[in-house]
Image (spheres, rainbow, N blue to C red):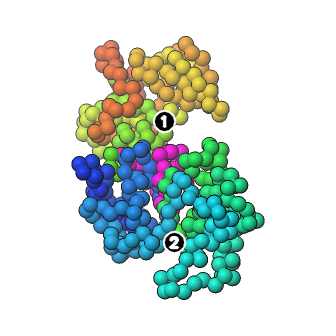
């Protein structure tokens, strides 16, 4: 069972009347790779700063290994931070940059033996794949190499937690992806907790054990990458994590949702009859029927080639569906679309309802379609899935 390392309890941060963190509660486990994900101004960097000790919350408590640390200064916390700007010492070579923290006097006044410093620096450079770079000038390194130096310097004192604030923001896309893999490998090799801040949802999905989605100073959802992608809690999370078609709907009964006057089988339950809901359908979960059959039929109005698939826009009486498929459907093609029960996710209405997606109202002509035209009977297999 995972051991809790950090806990934030009812933490609030406000600057005058501007509330940046709204009484958030969060715990972080030992050896966990946790990502704070959200757009600019959502409170993710502020959360990182109060964990690191650079900012005190107006109210609430921060616990580290069960001990309240609100008044503990940054240098006395077993935490190190890496920012987007690596702040390397340009007058020192790679070896001396990494060794810098070890050469400082310890709290007991003792200094680390130079042979021990050399051993630990070389060991750390090996961890970050810079074994033969010790004598290099840091200004001669690439962006990715400079970041590895910053990581090695932050980890050399063996902190229990490493805080990373948008550390890949200055790198190009290819290097970002390479460094995502390296950061995860380093975290696993070192066996310490990483708390990572980013606005890039693909980055969060690729690296994290746990994702904390934030907006407006509040935590919107906490979960695994798979859980948040497949089961978003509200329209904000569904829109922020990946591409989504978000539409208005009504729950008829457990396992039956209505959108655009059509009834679809789904796996959701626990809603009131005829309860208004938000319905999320991921673009990759929509099947195309070029014969024009399907519960919904529309016309292709846009096609974009993405390398391994096409992004296709289909106009269904004013609603623009995004579909991702390997099949090319030229603009002007009339197609039908089908959605399996496990491709539909039903959410409670929230303050984000109506803010994302194309919420076009459907025509009255669809209100008179009989249920018989659209089979809503479950198969035995579907019943088994729902349990």
Residue at point 56%, 58% (across, down): 87
Horizontal and vertical percent for residue 126? 70, 67
Horizontal and vertical percent for residue 240? 43, 40
Residue at point 49%, 27% (across, down): 322
N-terminal label among 1 and 2: 2
- Gap between marks 1 and 2 measured at Cα: 37 Å
Q: Is residue 356 above or below residue 4?
A: above
In the rendered image, residue 34 lying in the magenta stretch gets the answer: no
Q: Is residue 40 above or below residue 139?
A: above
Residue 84 lies left or right of residue 308; in this view the side is left
Q: Nearer the viewer, mark 1 or mark 2?
A: 2
Farthest-out residue, right? 132
| Residue 61 badge | none
Q: Nearer the viewer, residue 295 or 42?
A: 42
In the rendered image, residue 204 lying in the magenta stretch gets the answer: yes
Location of residue 130 (image quadrant): bottom right
Horizontal and vertical percent for residue 255? 36, 39
**Dot 2 surroundings within 10 Å: few (below 14), some, or many (20 or more)?**
some
Q: Is residue 92 above or below residue 329?
A: below
Farthest-out residue, front? 91
| Residue 159 badge | 2
Q: Which residue is mark 1?
A: 243
Residue at point 23%, 48% (across, down): 17
Q: From which residue to which does the magenta span run?
A: 194-215
Q: Nearer the viewer, residue 255 or 363?
A: 363
**Dot 1 surroundings within 10 Å: few (below 14), some, or many (20 or more)?**
some
Q: Secondary structure at mark 2?
A: loop
Q: Nearer the viewer, residue 240 or 373?
A: 240
Q: Which quadrant of the figure contains the N terminus?
A: bottom left
Q: Is residue 338 above or below residue 97?
A: above
Residue at point 65%, 44% (across, down): 174
- The reply to whether residue 214 is visible in this rendering is yes
């Amino acid at each position: 069972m995972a051991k809790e390392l950090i806990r934030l309890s009812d933490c609030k941060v406000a600057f005058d009347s501007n509330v940046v963190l709204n009484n958030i509660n969060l715990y972080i486990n030992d050896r966990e790779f946790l990502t704070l994900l959200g757009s600019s101004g959502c409170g993710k960097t502020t959360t990182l700063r109060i964990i690191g000790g650079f900012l005190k919350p107006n109210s609430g408590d921060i616990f580290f290994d069960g001990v309240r640390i609100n008044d503990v200064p940054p240098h006395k916390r077993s935490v190190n931070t890496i920012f987007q700007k690596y702040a390397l010492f340009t007058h020192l070579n790679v070896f001396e940059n990494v060794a810098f923290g070890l050469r400082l006097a310890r709290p007991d006044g003792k200094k680390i033996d130079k042979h021990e410093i050399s051993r630990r620096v070389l060991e750390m450079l090996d961890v970050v794949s810079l074994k033969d770079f010790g004598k290099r000038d840091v200004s001669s390194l690439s962006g990715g190499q400079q970041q590895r130096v910053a990581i090695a310097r932050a980890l050399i004192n063996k902190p229990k937690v490493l805080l990373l604030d948008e550390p890949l923001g200055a790198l190009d896309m290819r290097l970002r992806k390479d460094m995502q893999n390296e950061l995860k490998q380093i975290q696993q090799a070192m066996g310490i907790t990483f708390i990572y801040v980013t606005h890039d949802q693909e980055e969060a999905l690729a690296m994290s054990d746990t994702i904390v989605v934030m907006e407006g100073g509040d935590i919107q959802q906490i979960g695994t990458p798979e859980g948040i992608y497949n089961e978003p809690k509200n329209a904000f999370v569904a829109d922020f994590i990946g591409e989504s078609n978000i539409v208005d709907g009504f729950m008829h009964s457990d396992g039956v949702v209505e959108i655009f006057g059509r009834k679809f089988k789904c796996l959701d339950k626990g809603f009131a009859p005829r309860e208004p809901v938000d319905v999320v359908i991921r673009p990759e979960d929509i099947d195309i029927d070029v014969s024009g059959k399907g519960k919904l039929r529309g016309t292709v109005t846009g096609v974009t080639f993405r390398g391994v698939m096409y992004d296709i826009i289909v106009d269904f009486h004013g609603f623009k569906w995004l579909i991702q498929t390997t099949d090319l459907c030229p603009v002007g093609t009339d197609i039908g679309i089908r959605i399996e029960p496990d491709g539909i996710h039903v959410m409670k209405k929230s303050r984000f309802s109506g803010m994302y997606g194309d919420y076009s109202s459907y025509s009255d002509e669809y209100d008179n379609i009989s249920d018989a035209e659209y089979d809503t009977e479950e198969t035995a297999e579907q019943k088994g899935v729902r349990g």
